[in-house]
Amino acid sequence: MVRKIDEAALSNNFEEVEILIRDASTKLENGRAELDKETVEQLQSSLASMSRLARDMMNVPVNSCYKTERPKTGTVTPAKFEWSNFEIAEKSRFEALNPESASLKKRKFTEKVEQRAVIKFCVDIGKTPTGTHNFLKQSEKHSKVSRSLVFKWHKRFGDRRDNLEDNEREGRPSFRKSDAIKSEVLNVINSDRRLTVREVADKCDISKTTAHHILANDLNMNRVCARWVPRLLTAEHLTKRMKLSDQFIRKVSRGGIRFLDRIITTDESWFHYYDPETKQQSSQWKNCNSPPPKKAKVTKSMGKNMFILFMDRKGMLLTHAVPRGQTVNSEYYSKVLKRDLVQALRKKRPYLTANIEQVILHQDNAPAHTSLKTNLEIDLLGFECLKHPPYSPDLVPMDFAVFPHIKSFSVDKGSTIYLN
């Protein structure tokens, strides 16, 4: 009889186990018992635990001493049972965030509790821990159960423990990162990109470590500071910038290379006698075990000169050094245009001197460039002035192409010598 019950329990056939135990109980009442009264009571207690497990974890009704009735129509209906408040909240949250892994976790959890039910059954019939382990290994489903796990739960059930589930632990329940969680984190970040990792974790109800892992590894996002710009353009500035850029593109499409050859761009800048190396210029390769290089902080030299540069598509036209103490105002700038630029054009671009009205002067919106006196001098020279969008240093070739390139060569050498 005991051997038949062992085989039925090992194959998870609860109905057969129930029939055998009830048969043993009937024979005990009729005086034809094959097992003693104490063994039958232990078997009934073990059957009650397995029946409760099948009803709660699989949601399938099982005939047991708890009087759970099988549906007469042959359909399977979920058995009624009560979850604790903690289990209800955790189950609903996990299934909502992990739809694809909820069923997998449920199967694994069911298999784990099934092993504990079999271990409890073996404890009730008096098997040793080693015998219980060998008994479980006879099943293909539970053949890989560890010896230490069997011994641990054998001792717990031997100490009169009846609960087959894990004890509730403090802290946040663990769960898998699914696409639903990643989408939720992405939506939270898109709603407010200044949220910290802790705020994202609180809004998504996940741990801070999980939120950081999703942001950094799954979404490939990193937190950066805003870049300082001279000025934020208004809607009016952006509209004007778009119109002037569109006009320039149309002129280039009509005139082609000949139109670009007519443009002369100009700007002024300070050049120090000595510029210290930047962090990018002083970078070097090192091994992972070697210490990083050190560098003393060095300031720019006090000696400096201001230069006004004129260039076109073919190269530099004029490099004008401003005398010390001289301010580049409209009066001084007008003299440079009338005296030095015209002379440089006669020397380097004679074909433009013959048709001076074809020269297109491009300059930014500095006060010395847009004053009334400067505009009058440009009209007298016959130059055509190319309008520049407001607060747009990125559209000035001198600022983003010429000056940084020249100043990169002024490291450890005099910039005045280089320009001369």
Image: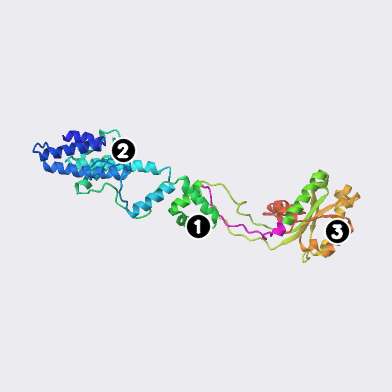
Q: Residues within 10 Å of mark 1 (few under 14, many from 20)?
A: some
What residue span does the magenta drawing correspond to? Answer: 219-238
Task: Kindly report which numbered mark, 2 or 1, lies closer to the viewer in this rendering.
Answer: 2
- Locate the C terminus and report the quarter of the image it occupies: bottom right
Which mark, residue 378?
3
Spatial separation of the CA atoms under disc 1 and disc 3 = 55 Å
- In the picture of the structure, the residue carrying the numbered disc 1 is 196
Residue at the front extreme, as displayed: 73
**Amino acid found under the numbered disc labelled 3:** Ile
- Locate the N terminus and report the quarter of the image it occupies: top left
Q: Residues within 10 Å of mark 3 (few under 14, many from 20)?
A: some
Dominant secondary-structure state across the stretch colored magenta: loop
Mark 2 and mark 3 lie on one chain; the one further toward the N terminus is 2
- In reply to whether residue 230 is colored magenta, the answer given is yes
Mark 2 and mark 1 lie on one chain; the one further toward the N terminus is 2
Regarding residue 381, the answer to whether it shows in the image is yes
Q: Secondary structure at mark 2?
A: loop
Which mark, residue 40?
none
Q: Secondary structure at mark 3?
A: helix
